[in-house]
Image (tube, helix red, strand yellow):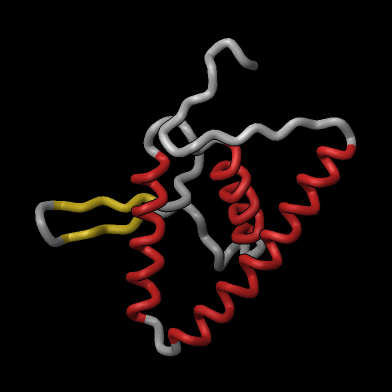
Amino acid sequence: MKKILEVLRYGDGDIIFKTDVDLAKNPNEISNILIQTMMSMATKLWGGNEQTVLAMIRMLTIADLALCTDRKEMIRWLDTESGRLFKAFQDTSAEFRKKGGKIMTFAPGVKPSKTRS
């Protein structure tokens, strides 16, 4: 198991970030983690805590944007890259459906039936 990102709060003020990922040694790992994260968020995140998890991810994004040197450029970049990933995900989903696959979605906080595999 590899720690992608651990965010710990000590007391009321100290927040510590830890990771086992070393992008200096393997810069391509970020692409793999991005795809794995997206797929996990699309397929495994439901189950009751997704609203809190997504809120924390968004909070980290807002904090990053607040500190970057060019917010507008960062937002443009995030929009472009997430748009490309969105299109690829939609295309993959459409191809999966064409081949007879079924995609089920669940509302936040709704767990799939335990009788389904």
Residue 86, position as x, y percentages in the image: 67, 59
Q: Residue furthest right?
A: 99
Indicate the quadrant containing the C terminus: top left, top right, bottom left or bottom right. top right
Residue 110, position as x, y percentages in the image: 45, 29
Q: Is residue 20 left or right of residue 15?
A: right
Q: Is residue 104 left or right of residue 58?
A: right
Q: Is residue 64 above or below residue 8?
A: below
Residue drawn 70% across the image and 66% down it:
84
| Towards the viewer: 47 or 13 | 47
Residue 47, position as x, y percentages in the image: 45, 30
Residue drawn 65% across the image and 60% down it:
31
| Towards the viewer: 34 or 115 | 115
Q: Is residue 35 left or right of residue 20?
A: right
How many numbered tags mark residues here?
Answer: 0
Q: Residue furthest front?
A: 107
Q: Is residue 43 left or right of residue 1?
A: right
Q: Is residue 36 above or below residue 16?
A: above
Q: Residue furthest top?
A: 115
Q: Quadrant of residue 69?
A: bottom left
Residue 4, position as x, y percentages in the image: 47, 50
Residue drawn 50% across the image and 81% down it:
74
Residue drawn 60% across the image and 36% down it:
105
